Amino acid sequence: MISINHYLALATVMFLCGTLGVLFRRNLLLVLMSVELMLNAVNLVFVAGSRLVNNLDGQVMVFFIITVAACEAGVGLAMVIALYRRYGTVETSFLRMLRG
């Protein structure tokens, strides 16, 4: 039987992979994907905790997080497209040169 510890361990690994992706990736699209992975890890914790206490509050919270994640993805992709059209690259090392 799968216990809450298994879900928490999986969510920890997912969040760690997302954090490492945000810290070490050079492409903005991959950074956005890593942020989405981190949000999904949090969603997994909410659902597992909700199931543990037999309460639907955690699952309702997941719907709000999914909504925020969709908005974040839309705005983030729009910014990436605008940067690509303006400068021709989406590398994070190039964006450091844009500091004033």
Image (cartoon, rainbow, N blue to C red):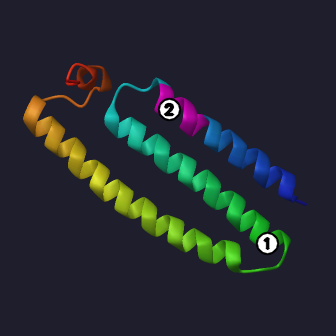
Note whether 67 is above or below 40 in the view shown. below
Principal secondary structure, stretch drawn in magenta? helix
Note whether 64 is above or below 88 in the view shown. below
Query: Which residue is at the far front?
Result: 100
The answer to whether 7 appears left or right of 88 in the picture is: right
The part of the chain drawn in magenta is 17-23
Let me know if residue 74 is in the magenta part: no
Give the residue displayed 69% in from the left and 49% down from the top. 11
The dot on residue 8 is: none
The residue to which callout 2 is attached is 21
- Marks 2 and 1 sit apart, C-alpha to C-alpha, by 29 Å
Say which quadrant the C terminus sits in: top left
Let me know if residue 20 is in the magenta part: yes
Q: How many marks?
A: 2
Q: Amino acid at mark 1?
A: Arg
Q: Position of residue 81 (x, y in %)?
A: 18, 44
Give the residue displayed 27% in from the left and 49% down from the top. 77
Q: Amino acid at mark 2?
A: Gly
The dot on residue 51 is: 1
Q: Residues within 10 Å of mark 1 (few under 14, many from 20)?
A: some
Q: Position of residue 18 (x, y in %)?
A: 55, 39
Query: Which residue is at the far right?
Result: 1
Say which quadrant the N terminus sits in: bottom right
Give the residue displayed 67% in from the left and 59% down from the top. 44
